[in-house]
């Protein structure tokens, strides 16, 4: 059978709590949360109240389609959420290994940017930016830090 003219993308079928199925076209870079949000928007549900389940496993909605290990035309099911995905009360530990072998660690709320977290911690200036062998693109508002060697 020939592939569709639109590039032969994959699709997934999602069973909503109201018993209706919704088919969502996905690309390898589609995040599973987008699949849930698209289905909820079409079926008039709140995506913050549901997870996606494949067979007996609740899926990690932060994964891209290519990393979710799901077959084409997978049949997913919307299930009530078991724990909240939101909330700045979730704490994460960030550790930095510096060139001199020292290690800095601190705990931060997961809802904060790296810039805000570094400013609020004992790291008054991000220490890795001061190291002459590293150049750091670390700007307010970004949720990540891109570091590259200047050598």
Image: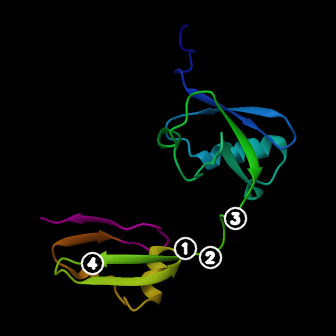
Residue at numbered disc 4: 129
Q: Residue at x 39, y 92 (%)?
A: 122
Q: Position of residue 23 (x, y in %)?
A: 71, 31
Residue at numbered disc 1: 110
The one of 48 and 142 positioned closer to us in this rendering: 48
Q: Nearer the viewer, mark 3 or mark 4?
A: 3
Residue at numbered disc 2: 88
Q: Which residues are magenta?
A: 138-151
On whether residue 143 falls in the magenta region, the answer is yes
Q: Nearer the viewer, mark 2 or mark 3?
A: 3
Q: Residue furthest left?
A: 151
Q: How is the image coloured?
A: rainbow
Q: Residue at x 49, y 36 (%)?
A: 28
At numbered mark 4, what does the secondary structure look like: helix, strand or loop?
Answer: helix
Q: Nearer the viewer, mark 2 or mark 4?
A: 2
Q: Nearer the viewer, mark 4 or mark 1?
A: 1
- Dividing the picture into quadrants, the one containing residue 74 is top right
- Dividing the picture into quadrants, the one containing residue 75 is top right
Q: Residue furthest front?
A: 56
How packed is label 3: few (under 14 Cα within 10 Å), some, or many (20 or more)? few
Residue contact at pointers 2 and 3, CB within 8 angstroms = no
Q: CA distance from mark 3 to mark 4?
A: 37 Å
How packed is label 1: few (under 14 Cα within 10 Å), some, or many (20 or more)? some
The one of 68 and 25 positioned closer to us in this rendering: 68
From the viewer's perspective, is 6 left or right of 139?
right
How packed is label 4: few (under 14 Cα within 10 Å), some, or many (20 or more)? some
Residue 83, labelled with which disc?
3
At numbered mark 2, what does the secondary structure look like: helix, strand or loop?
Answer: loop
Q: Quadrant of the C terminus?
A: bottom left
Q: Which is more N-terminal, label 4 or label 3?
A: 3
Q: Position of residue 141 (x, y in %)?
A: 50, 71
């Amino acid at each position: 059978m020939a592939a569709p003219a639109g590039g032969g993308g994959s699709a997934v079928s999602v069973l909503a709590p109201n018993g209706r199925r919704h088919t969502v076209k996905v690309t390898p870079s589609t995040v599973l949360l987008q699949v849930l949000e698209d289905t909820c928007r079409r079926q008039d549900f709140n995506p913050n109240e549901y997870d996606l389940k494949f067979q007996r496993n609740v899926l990690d909605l932060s994964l891209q389609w290519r990393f979710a290990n799901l077959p084409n035309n997978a049949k997913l099911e919307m299930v009530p959420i078991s724990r909240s995905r939101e909330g700045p009360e979730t704490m994460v530990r960030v550790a930095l290994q510096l060139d001199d072998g020292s290690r800095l660690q601190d705990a931060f709320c997961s809802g904060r940017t790296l810039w805000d977290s570094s400013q609020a911690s004992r790291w008054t200036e991000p220490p890795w930016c001061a190291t002459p062998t590293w150049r750091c693109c670390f700007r307010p508002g970004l949720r990540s830090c891109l570091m590259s060697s200047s050598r």
